[in-house]
Image (cartoon, rainbow, N blue to C red):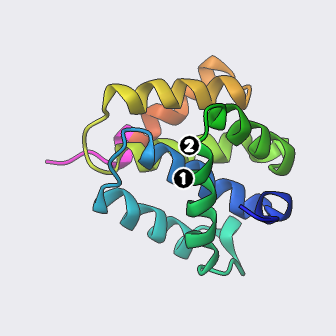
Amino acid sequence: MNDVPHSMTAQDCLVAVMVAVSASDERLRTTELVTIERIVNHLPVFGGYDQDRIRTVSQVVFDLFAEEDGLDAFFGLIRDNLPERLNETAYALACDVAAADGALQQTEIRFLEEIRYELSIDRLAGAAIERGARARHMTL
């Protein structure tokens, strides 16, 4: 992992959360990866972000998840480098990625609960964010 965790930007943290929720069920689905790319391409919070960092940040997430206490280290890294004012943004992006393939796996639901807890997302705000993600990813 070299020094990458120490140089994580707020944008890197948002990407890491999205990658982590995609990887939480041990299957990186194409729809989820396309959603991450679309989000990075279009949301103002990613203005000026170097998309080449996505691969590096993804590798950090995978490396952490391979470690015994990797989940704790992952959340420590996010809390240390993501401004608190972006916690709800991170949760909203995680919900969008999880909902992108049209079905939430039990592991994704548990991981979203963990993100909500670790980032101190209020229960009511979390429910609103989740409902918004469901509404945006509905199909006919």
Foreground pick, 13 / 125: 13
| Residue located 48% across and 43% down the image | 21
Q: Position of residue 43 (x, y in %)?
A: 59, 67
**Which range is magenta?**
134-140
Q: Position of residue 11 (x, y in %)?
A: 72, 63
| Residue located 61% across and 32% down the image | 68
Tell me the amino acid under the disc marked 2: Phe
Q: Position of residue 118 (x, y in %)?
A: 70, 27
Q: Position of residue 58 (x, y in %)?
A: 56, 61
Relative to 11, residue 105 above or below: above
* Residue assigned mark 2: 65
Secondary structure beneath dot 2 equals helix
Quarter of the figure that contains the N terminus: bottom right
Q: Residues within 10 Å of mark 1 (few under 14, many from 20)?
A: some
Does the segment drawn in magenta span residue 135? yes
Foreground pick, 85 / 32: 32
Q: Do the CB atoms of the residues marked 1 and 2 lie less than 8 Å apart?
A: yes
Compared across the picture, whether 116 is left or right of 107 comes to right
Secondary structure beneath dot 1 equals helix
How many numbered marks, from 0 up?
2
Relative to 74, residue 107 above or below: above
Compared across the picture, whether 18 is left or right of 3 comes to left
Relative to 139, residue 69 above or below: above
Relative to 102, residue 11 above or below: below
Alpha carbons under labels 1 and 2: distance apart: 5 Å
| Residue located 50% across and 30% down the image | 111
* Residue assigned mark 1: 62
Tell me the amino acid under the disc marked 1: Phe
Does the segment drawn in magenta span residue 89? no
| Residue located 73% across and 38% down the image | 73
The answer to whether residue 121 is seen in the rendering is: no
